[in-house]
Structures are given as structure tokens and as C-alpha cells.
Amino acid sequence: MTDNNIILQARGVTKRFPGVLANDKVDFDLKKGEIHVLLGENGAGKTTLMNILYGLYHQDEGEMLVNGVAVKVDSPNDSIALGIGMVHQHFMLVPVFTVAENVMLGDETTRRGILDRKTVSAKVKELSHQHGLDVDPEALVGQLPVGIQQRVEIVKTLYRNAQILILDEPTAVLTPQEADELFVIMRGLTARGVSIIFITHKLKEVLAVADRITVMRSGRVVGTVTPEEMNEAKLASMMVGREVILKVKKGEAEPKEKILIVENLEVQDDRGVEVVRGVSFEVREGEILGIAGVQGNGQTQLAEVLTGLRLAKKGSIFMNGKDVTGKTPRPIIEAGLAHIPEDRQRHGLVLGDTVADNLVLCTYYQPPFAKWIVIQQEAVDANARKLIEEYDVRTPSPFVLTSKLSGGNQQKVIVARELSRDVKLLIASQPTRGLDVGSIEYIHKEIIAMRDRGIGVLLISAELDEIMALSDRIAVMYRGQIVTTVDAKKATREELGLWMAGSHA
């Protein structure tokens, strides 16, 4: 591949937000038919650069070139017209529409004023077969597995003649087998001349699929390398600027008394559909029980019921010797619960409050943060300064609104608040989602340290590597049921992946 094959280029791109230099003279290029991985910590500037490419932001300085021609991209429509497509981590699909209807949404084909579904279905079928995606254009999207829904998103971009494809954390919701299938599809696309920018935090995937890797740190490009000259440790060091211990170090668990007992739990979602069906399990002091499963198999609603955010239809929950079935969050917290919620903005933070106030959300009414009904602001502020330093929360001050922080730093605020309290049980749902390798390393150490102090941990994660690295026992959820529970030391990725996909044989 020569430089004549460069299809997209960023030259000296700079983007400023109030108090933040998000992109600092960034140079980046993409060659025809390659997979170029963009890697970096939270706040490194990856998302900002991609948003500029896709027309959601406009750079303050520098220029963008497509096929050697300087372009101005003011909206996603401009980007799509230039042949740039983006597949977001959270799919932009309408579940009650067919594949064909989703694909043509916003770019409808009509005949005599009526939607021409037949023509679109034929084109979708041809496109999907041509690129090895093979999706049924007449299938309802809501009835498709997550891996197939992702293929629909890719077909949507190809339908609009995308030659440049941006994939944002595409394997976050896939089983290992589905991720491998996606990599085969990606290679098929590049063989036909499509160029791919691949954003991921999974270093194994980077080395497996990349042609080139560009690493960003603090808004700047620190280097562009090839997989042949790198390994996971070197990539992590480039990202963070220091040596990172990637392998979780832990001794043998010493389980003691049962701290959480769940019996025959049945839970409905907001539509009244049963999504947790007869689930029973227990967590002991001094152990980590991991709940593995593809996102959307009842894990979210299970965590909500255990933490008082949703009522169970049936079943019992005992925590620290107390029956907490149907209780609201405060008595459950007072029974000894720490909770890292899956949706940090909805269930973990008050975005309109300061970082300092968010760090005492569970304890603001207790000494030393309150005297009678009066908040002791000095104690609140001192607590914030201490935790911000200990947990490396990147904020200009404790008095910044939490809404102004990056997603990763919002997560750190929650982790700091929950792990710094005296608790008996930790329920951690997707605890490292959106975090960089340095922060993941720190949080993993903290979770292991909590286990070693005799705290029970229920870990719910869509990251199979995280489940396998941290757990002492692993339970797999599929369609609302726990279909197997295994000793983590004896589990393999392949076996767990098959259980996650519903292959029980």
C-alpha cells in the first residue's frame, strides 16, 4: 500500500471546548482497503475526532481531506454524501420494522408515492450477500440476535454507498463467536475496497484485526504503529504513558457466610414482559460471582430488582441476613450494599449537582457530612478532594457539575463513592464500561481488594474477559434464566460463549 492510496486525511485538526483542548494538531490518515484502529484513554480525543469526521462537530483549526480534496463537513448528511458511514455502539434501529425498512429509513425509495419495499429488499439481499453479511430483508429487527442486528447497521451504511466505515466499540455486545464472525466480515469488506476506522479498548482485538494502529493521549497523536511491532503491554503503555499491569492478580478466594440469597426471582420489564424467570443463586462473603451473558438477557432488570430500582413479580431477596424483597434503595444501602449501576447517568449520578455532592449521595444525611439537618460543606469538600485524588477523577475542581465530565470520569465518581464506603456486598454492573486500560486496572484491583476484605461481589458484565479474570464462580444468563454455573478456573471462553448464545448441548 502506498501513500497514493490514502482515502481520508486529517491535517493539524484542533478542537477546543471551554477549558479543554480536545484535539491538539491531530494528524491521521486512512488508506483504501485497510483497518485502522484508533486507540486511547478516555478524554484522549478519539470520539471528538470521529465526531468531526462524521459532521457532528467542526474543527477550530486544520482540515479534512477525502480522496485528496479538502472538504467541509457540517452535518452527518455531508459525511454520508462523502461516503462516510458510522456504526454506533448503541444501534440506531427500530425493533418493530423489518430489516429493509430500517435500512431505507431516512432514504426511502417510493413508487407512485408508496414505499417500494420489494426493490429495497432485493437490494439489501444483494448487498448483504455480496459482503458476506447475509441478513433476511423481511425479518423483524426486534426478533434478530444482537450480532445480526449489527450486520443490519453495516448494511445500512453500504446501502448509502459508504466507502469509509467507522465502527465504534462494535464488539461490546457480542459473544466471542459473534466477534470472530464480525472480524471475518470486516476483512471481506476491506478486500472489496472499503476502509474501516475501528475504535475499541480491547487490546487483543486490536492486535488480531488491525493493519495500522494510531494511539492518542491527551488530545494528541503519540504514534502510529503496526501490530507486528507491538504487544498488549506496549500498546497499554503508549495509551496511558506508564507501564500497566494487564493481568489481574488475585489469590484463592476464601468464601464464608452467605451475604446475598436470591430465590425463584421473576421480574418483568417496562412492557410487562417477563425477562427474569425463576432465577436463584447466592453470593458469599469473600467471593466474586460473575454473571456472564450477552446484553439484553435480563441482567439489567436483575440488578435493578436487587438494588431496589424495580419491583420483582415473584421471589425473595435476603441481604446480610435481612429480607430486602421489595425495599427501596435507601434501606438496601443501609443493609450494606454498594452499587455500580449499568446506566451511570440515569441511576448513578445527579448530573446537575457538583462532583463533591455526587460523592456523598449515599451518606449526605449522616455524620460527618450532616449535623442534624444541616449539611457540613467542609466535610463534603474534604471528602471530594480525597476521593478525586485516590481514584484519579479528572476534573478541574470538586465544584464542577458532574454533567461536564467525560463518561469515563463520571464512572470514576460512582466507583469512588461506592468503593470507599464500609459495605458488605458490592453489585457491580458493567463497572469498567467506557474506561481506559489504566482505570480498568485500578478498578479491578479495588474489586479484588474488596473480595479479599471479606466483601461479597456480584459482578455483571458483558465483557467476557473481565468476567473470567475477576470471578471465582461464573453464572451464565440466557433469556432470563441462569443456564449454568461453573468454577471460573475450569471455564473456557468457547464454552461460555456457547452458553451465552443459547447452545446448551
Image: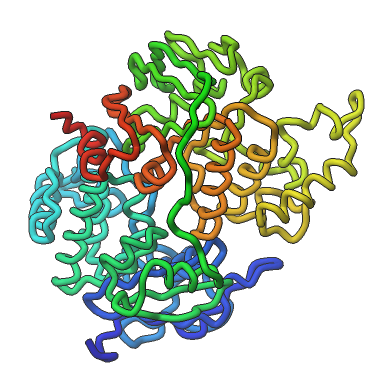
In percent of the image, x 52 and y 38: which residue is there? 343
Q: Quadrant of the N terminus?
A: bottom left
Residue 434, position as x, y percentages in the image: 49, 52
In percent of the image, x 25 and y 75: which residue is there? 34
Compared to 276, does 172 lie above or below? Answer: below
Question: What coloring was used for the rendering?
Answer: rainbow
Residue 492, position as x, y percentages in the image: 25, 43
Q: Quadrant of the C terminus?
A: top left
Is 118 in front, or is 41? 41
Is 323 in front, or is 66? 323
Q: How many marks?
A: 0
Q: Quadrant of residue 208?
A: bottom left
Q: Quadrant of residue 276?
A: top left
Compared to 427, does 265 lie above or below? Answer: above
Q: Quadrant of residue 80?
A: bottom left
Residue 99, position as x, y percentages in the image: 20, 43
Residue 97, position as x, y percentages in the image: 25, 37
Give left or right: position of 122 versus 103.
left
In percent of the image, x 20 and y 32: which residue is there? 502
Compared to 186, does 345 lie above or below? Answer: above
Does residue 439 appear in this view?
yes
Does residue 103 appear in this view?
no
Give left or right: position of 171 versus 367.
left
Give left or right: position of 114 versus 337.
left
In percent of the image, x 80 and y 45: which residue is there? 383
